Image (tube, rainbow, N blue to C red):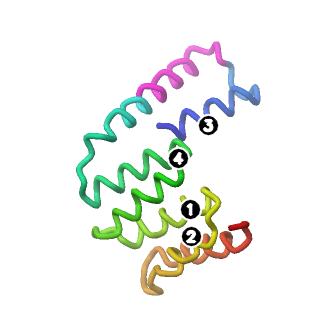
Amino acid sequence: AAVALGALNDARSANVIDPNDPQTQRLFQAATQRNQAAVAALPRLPATPEGRMQAGHVFFGQNRYPQAANAYRQALRGPGADQARVLAGIALVRAGDGAGARQLLDGVPDTSPFNDIAELWSLYAQTQRA
């Protein structure tokens, strides 16, 4: 929801969409409501890997990358560990921690379906100042 709201705000700032258009106003309203609901639900998310993954998504969508990385790290104990590792690495890249990101991303096994994504982001992290 936060990503959608951000995209709408960017489009409005660039004069790509008409803020007075009824459809645009409904989109803003829906994105705002969903974003507020996601944030309000954070304290009620279970302290399970799945709940931590969901928290990571909310934090990531709000550009709160250190919190997202922390939540995704807590999800590493769950069945989606490789996905959580990649998402934590991406969040760390976005937070400016290229070295930490590379460490996480390089831990994705070669046999994982997420390995190609991890390698791409690890390469990108090498270009970022840590």
**Badge 1 amino acid:** Leu
The residue positioned 61% from the left and 73% from the top of the image is 99
Relative vertical location of residue 112 with respect to residue 56 in this rendering, above or below: below
Residue 63's disc number: none
Residue 64's disc number: 4
- Asked whether 11 falls inside the magenta stretch, the response is no
State which mark lies toward you, 2 or 3.
Answer: 2
Position in image of residue 23 (x %, y %): 55, 20
- State which quadrant residue 71 falls in: bottom left
Q: Which residue is mark 3?
A: 7
First in residue order: circle 4 vs circle 3: 3
Position in image of residue 121 (x %, y %): 61, 70
**Badge 3 amino acid:** Ala
Position in image of residue 32 (x %, y %): 48, 26
**Badge 2 amino acid:** Ala
Q: Is residue 33 left or right of residue 52?
A: right
The residue positioned 68% from the left and 19% from the top of the image is 18
State which mark lies toward you, 4 or 3.
Answer: 4
Q: Which residue is mark 1?
A: 92
Which residues are drawn in magenta?
A: 19-33
